[in-house]
Image (cartoon, rainbow, N blue to C red):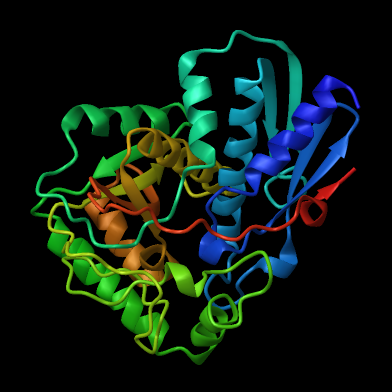
Amino acid sequence: MNETRKALRDAVSASLFAPSILNTQPWHWRLRDACLELSRDPDRRLAAIDPTGRMVMVSCGTALHHARVILQARGYAVEVRRLPAGSAAEPLAVVEPTGPAPVAPPDVEMAAAIRHRRSDRRPIAATSRVDDGTIAALDDAAAREGCALFRIGDTERPYLGAAVAEAQRTEGSDPAYRRDLAAWTVRRPPGGGVSFESLVAAVARPVAVRDFAGDGETGLFAGFGDDRFADYLIVGTPADTGLDQLRAGEATSAVWLTATARDLAMSVMSDVVEVPATRASLDGLLAGRARPQLVLRTGIQGQPVPPPPASHRELRDVLDE
């Protein structure tokens, strides 16, 4: 196996650690000649939670960015052709190394963060907010992926909290939603889903997180925080095409890896964008500056023990050679 082909396989292996909706990992790769082709895996789309496939596109974007990070850290210049055959066609992206490139320290830092990244839904226990310089670094990470990051201010936070609560009420009343949720939590398949060990008990917070447990049982001690000093960041795109959704996933990965390298806790809040009415509420918060794709919750964690890693699919399940 030549070095480039090995690097491409390693890039796919790294993509297995990317965040995705309910840890479904809804992507598939094909290694052909000296390039990778990224496609959606239709068998892992959540029919009730994600009827339009928006979150599949965002999830595939996170996998694409993880793969890019590894190739760049290995010293490859990378050309990415996104949606080369049109917005409804596969593959979603073609990744091709085009030659050697210098490796900068941030490339190595981002690659190292991949194995340490966790979804941490425990309440933020810190007594201060993330500093403005760190938020600026997260902004820059999103901007490099063609997206914008909007920090929710104190006066806007109640509106976000109300939108999230409405989304959770709407989804919670839908039997099909509850079936999707159970399929990827209680009855989760091997190599995917949200494990019991990562569930957190419901606690009072300014903005509620999705209730995975349902029956109140949890596997992870929630700690003593209350999210009072959490920050909420909206990932925004210029429009709402398939390309925008893919780029939002790349930006989410870039922001999350940047946060991980700076020892911040982070989790994704997708329920508020899954319901059209509450996604429209986020549109109102952004006031036409961008289209909302996702909400990220972050903060200085202060918990002594990291959350457990998520389970992942096997390389053979996501890669055709």
Of the pair 63 and 215, the residue shown nearer to us:
215
| 176 sits to left or right of 225 | right
For the point 78% across and 36% down, the residue is 9
Of the pair 141 and 193, the residue shown nearer to us:
193
43 over 133 or under it: above or below: below
- The quarter of the image holding the C terminus is top right
Of the pair 5 and 156, the residue shown nearer to us:
5
For the point 60% across and 8% down, the residue is 102
Q: Position of residue 250 (x, y in %)?
A: 53, 39
- The quarter of the image holding the N terminus is top right
Q: Is residue 137 visible?
A: yes
Q: Position of residue 141 (x, y in %)?
A: 40, 30
Residue 205 quadrant: bottom left
| 65 sits to left or right of 269 | right
For the point 27% across and 68% down, the residue is 222
Q: Position of residue 174 (x, y in %)?
A: 46, 88
Q: Is residue 93 visible?
A: no
195 over 132 or under it: above or below: below
* Number of marks in picture: 0
Q: Position of residue 226 (x, y in %)?
A: 16, 64
Residue 284 quadrant: bottom left
* Residue at the farthest front position: 304
| 85 sits to left or right of 215 | right
| 187 sits to left or right of 194 | right
261 over 163 or under it: above or below: above
For the point 31% across and 42% down, the residue is 264
